[in-house]
Amino acid sequence: MNRRAFLKSILSISAGAGLCGFSSFAGAQEITRPVEEKDLKDYLHRMANFDTPQPGDIILKDKDLKLLKSSLSRLRRVQRTVGFGNFCVLDFDDTLKFGRNYSSIGSFSKQEQEFLDKTFHFDAHNYGFFGEKPVEKLTTTISRKDLVKVPRTGNFLYRGDPYNKYLKIRKELGNNVYLTSGVRGVAKQFILFLAKAEANGGNLSLASRSLAPPGYSYHGVGDFDVGEKGLGAANFSALFAETGTCIKLREYGYLQLRYPENNLLGVRFEPWHIKV
């Protein structure tokens, strides 16, 4: 997205100020005032404070928030049943099937299915997320024959370029670097995105600033995350950029970042994200 198109896009964020839920947002009016430099400054401020609620954020309330919580709870029960690694590559239809077949999970209600469908198909530009959508179908499947399970990580990578790139990184950087997140199907991205929103009072816009909405994650088509052993959760923070691992990744040319600093995509800086 070029700068001018981007500035026009960010005007639409403030059009949704104070709205709660998808149905309310559908009635928002587009802002047609001239684009100003202040709009860019406001955007950069919002991204510098990505984990803080901002004016214009889309926040679910009442019925929609209850559906978020019940859907997320059921998704988590599926994840516990099939295992965390297997859930990463479980497709949406099979996720629903597990709900129907296991009383410990329970069937996804019609309302929950409609909520998940609406969340997937909602235009993430309305959140302030301007990335592309590489996974266009809610029911997209991931073939196990196309995957390699990476030992001692609980994660899968696609055969071919993604797996080969990871092997090269390990060969050149050594055992101090490891895979923190590999292939993610739609169901897994739902859990990550909805969990972030739930932890922040149903704020979908805030969630989108650090986690791609379902369908918008490149983990579904090949990208992966790496970290430095011993760093723990800080591998998913700006601190990773200061590590020896990240410095070497940059030196060897592996940091072709999907989300660099001060990007115009509405996503925080992700130095751990390896673009394939």
Image (cartoon, helix red, strand yellow):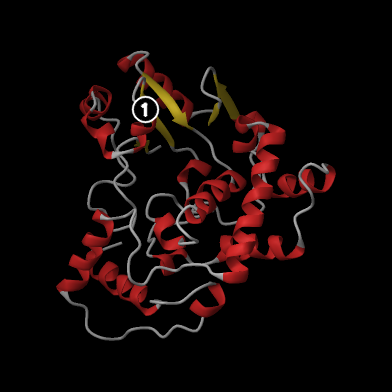
Instruction: Give the percent coordinates (x, y) of residue 35.
Output: 21, 78
Q: Residues within 10 Å of mark 1 (few under 14, many from 20)?
A: many
- Residue at 46% of width from left, 61% of height from top? 204
Task: Say whether residue 257 is left or right of residue 143.
Answer: left
Instruction: Give the percent coordinates (x, y) of residue 25.
Output: 49, 77
Quadrant in which the C terminus is drawn: top left
Task: Say whether residue 128 is left or right of residue 147.
Answer: left
Residue 140 or residue 272, whichever sits in front: 272
- Residue at 30% of width from left, 75% of height from top? 11
Q: Quadrant of residue 130?
A: bottom left
SS at mark 1 in the image = strand
| Residue that protrudes farthest toward the left in the picture | 37
Quadrant in which the N terminus is drawn: bottom left
Q: Is residue 167 above or below residue 241?
A: above
Instruction: Give the percent coordinates (x, y) of residue 26.
Output: 51, 79
Q: Is residue 128 above or below residue 49?
A: below
Instruction: Give the percent coordinates (x, y) of residue 137.
Output: 61, 56
- Residue at 76% of width from left, 44% of height from top? 105
Look at mark 1 in the image and give the residue it sits on: 227
Q: Quadrant of residue 78?
A: top right
Q: Is residue 140 above or below residue 151?
A: below
